[in-house]
Image: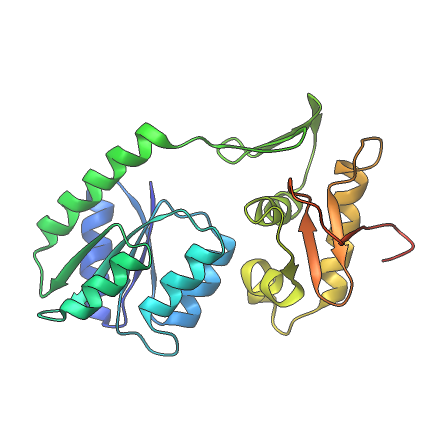
Amino acid sequence: MRILVVEDQPPLARAVRQALEEDGYEAEVATDGEQADARVGRTAYDLIVLDVMLPKVDGLTLLSRWRRAGVGAHVIMLTAKGRTADKVAGLDRGADDYLAKPFAVDELLARVRALARRTHTKSDPIRRIHDLEIDTAAHTVTRSGRPIELTPREFALLDFLAARAGRVVTHDAIWRGLYDELGEPNSNLIAVYIRYLRKKVDVGFDPPLILSKWGEGYMLRGTEPTDAQPVTDEDE
């Protein structure tokens, strides 16, 4: 189970991460809202421990953003003691649980284990869009039963679009989600990977699934009608 701890107090973040790792989980730390948003954009976490009060982007804003984007990770909010409004707002925006600071690490671990049990009973690693199947656990892709070989970057981009199927994903969102560590946004790099994906996922199949919304970004075809257009080599 992969967990992201979003906490701007280094001693607490280290203590929580250490406790999670000792309990057998894979844990990472983000120390501000922007860093957390970038990590969630490019990594599929099973659970996020999210502080409400964060530098750059606060926890409630992040939670709303992630739920709108289709992020399904369980979220445990960390709130200041007595801040009932924060607890209510977190639950209303999609948090699964909350803890008031200061808290006992053992209690946090117990809540993580409870959410982990829920994850194992409901989780389906397969994303299905039309005749395309993406196994997010095995990192394999098939279309109409035919296996499609993708590089890790191609798989990450396809899965990123599939998690938001039917919605246009902007160039900026793709860059922040997948390539932020490369520096300044470069839409040409995104276009190159879209071209690679289309040759593997769309050529020889019908209908084309990778669509372009001119001047905005890309999307994976959903079930609803759209004015986005198929991408062609000439367009890129």
Q: Is residue 24 left or right of residue 210?
A: left
Going 9% across and 49% down the picture, which residue do you hit?
106
Above or below for 23 versus 169: above
Above or below for 234 versus 158: below
Colour convention of the picture = rainbow
Q: Disc count in the image?
A: 0
Above or below for 122 versus 5: above
Q: Residue furthest bottom?
A: 56
Occupied quadrant, residue 11:
bottom left
Q: Nearer the viewer, residue 224 or 165?
A: 224
Question: Residue 31, position in %: x, y?
Answer: 33, 70
Quarter of the picture containing the N terminus is top left
Q: Is residue 226 left or right of residue 74?
A: right
Question: Residue 123, position in %: x, y?
Answer: 39, 32
Question: Residue 78, position in %: x, y?
Answer: 20, 63
Quarter of the picture containing the C terminus is bottom right
Going 50% across and 57% down the picture, which residue do you hit?
41
Going 73% across and 41% down the picture, which residue do you hit?
209
Going 19% across and 56% down the picture, which residue do you hit?
98
Q: Residue furthest top?
A: 145
Q: Nearer the viewer, residue 154 or 117?
A: 117
Q: Nearer the viewer, residue 109 or 225?
A: 225
Occupied quadrant, residue 119:
top left
Q: Residue furthest right?
A: 234
